[in-house]
């Protein structure tokens, strides 16, 4: 059974700093991994999707990496802004399964 | 803009009553929708897969008679929480599947059972 863990559970950093969020998963037979953003009381917005054959994906100030063999992914946010404050979730999709298994999330607060 | 809507966005009900939550696809004919539940400070847990025109597939531990899912059209899936109890209070989110690896999520419905 796939299990996804995110560390830390919460993170506060001053505006302008670069930061890294971590995601680990137990079953490396994944089809893809996604990073989502969730604002309080809201649904999810997909940020980046990495296929199992890829090592990283970039979108603006966001960069996600994937090391499938070690069961890890990181989300790097450059030059953080107060608008980046949200909960970030990673989710994996295993081969032969359309379901997503979500991590516990990291609640990020950017301090102005 | 939003591609999946949910109604209501929040609901408060008395214990023992039933609550219906709608998940609507705004610009796509979704044959498959998913229902998730999220307790405070916890992650999303898949409850069931809703298939248009057929019975929903429930995850282990989810009572199908308590959480009734109807996917009667390609744009609408409903989740009915029957005889709701305080422990059912949660944030319910639906998503629609587009392709093998793409899901669009609704804004969620917060349920509080008194």
Image (spheres, coloured by chain):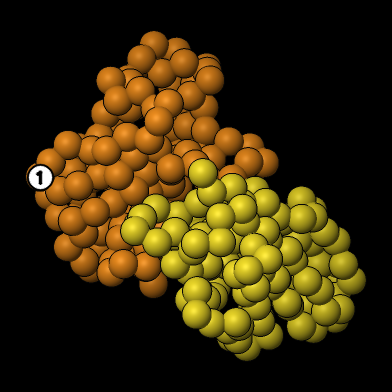
Chain colours: A yellow, B orange
**The quadrant where residue A77 appears:** bottom right
Chain letter for mark 1: B
Residue pictured at 76% horizontal, 83% vertical: A78
Identity of the residue furthest to the right in this view: A14
Label 1 sits on residue: B53
Left or right: A52, with B17 as reference point: right
Q: Is residue B56 above or below residue A4?
A: above
**B35 relative to B73 in the view: left or right:** right
Q: Nearer the viewer, residue B3 or B29?
A: B29
Q: Residue A48, how many percent across, how many down?
A: 54, 75
User: Which element carries disc 1, helix, strand or loop?
Assistant: loop
Question: Residue farthest to the top?
Answer: B16
> In the depicted view, which residue is nearer to us: B28 or A89?
A89
At x 23%, y 38%, the residue is B56
Q: Nearer the viewer, residue B112 or B79?
A: B79
The image quadrant that residue B69 belongs to is top left
Q: Residue B108, percent across and down?
A: 45, 48
Instruction: Give the vertical position of B69 relative to A57 (above or below).
Output: above
> Left or right: where does residue A107 sit relative to residue A93?
right
Residue B109 seen by the camera? no
Residue A65 in the image: above or below residue B65: below
Which residue sits at x=69%, y=72%? A75
Q: Where does residue A41 sit, x and y in percent of width and height?
A: 57, 49
Q: What is the tally of numbered marks visible in this picture? A: 1
Q: Is residue A96 visible?
A: yes
Above-or-below relation of B15 to A88: above
* Residue displayed at 21% across by 59% down: B30
Image position, residue B20 (x, y; %): 30, 32
Q: Quadrant of the N terminus of chain B?
A: bottom left
Dot 1 alpha-carbon crowd within 10 angstroms: few under 14, some 14 to 19, many 20 or more: few
């Amino acid at each position: 059974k796939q299990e996804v863990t995110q560390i830390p559970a919460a993170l506060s950093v001053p505006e302008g700093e670069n930061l890294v969020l971590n995601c680990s998963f137990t079953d490396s037979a994944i089809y893809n991994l996604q990073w989502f953003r969730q604002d309080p009381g809201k649904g999810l917005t997909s940020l980046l999707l990495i296929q199992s054959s890829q090592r990283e994906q970039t979108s603006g100030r966001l960069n996600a990496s994937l090391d499938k063999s070690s069961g890890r992914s990181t989300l790097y946010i450059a030059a953080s802004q107060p608008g980046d404050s949200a909960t970030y979730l990673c989710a994996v999709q295993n081969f032969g399964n359309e379901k997503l298994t979500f991590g516990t999330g990291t609640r990020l607060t950017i301090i102005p | 803009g939003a591609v999946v809507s949910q109604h209501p966005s929040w609901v408060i009900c008395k214990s023992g009553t039933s609550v219906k939550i709608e998940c609507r696809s705004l610009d796509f004919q979704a044959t498959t929708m998913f229902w998730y539940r999220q307790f405070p400070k916890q992650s999303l847990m898949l409850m069931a897969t809703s298939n248009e025109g057929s019975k929903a597939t429930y995850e282990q531990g989810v009572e199908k008679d308590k959480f009734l899912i109807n996917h009667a059209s390609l744009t609408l899936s409903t989740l009915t929480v029957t005889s709701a109890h305080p422990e059912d209070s949660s944030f319910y989110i639906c998503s629609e599947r587009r392709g093998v690896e793409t899901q669009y999520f609704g804004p969620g419905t917060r349920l509080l059972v008194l």
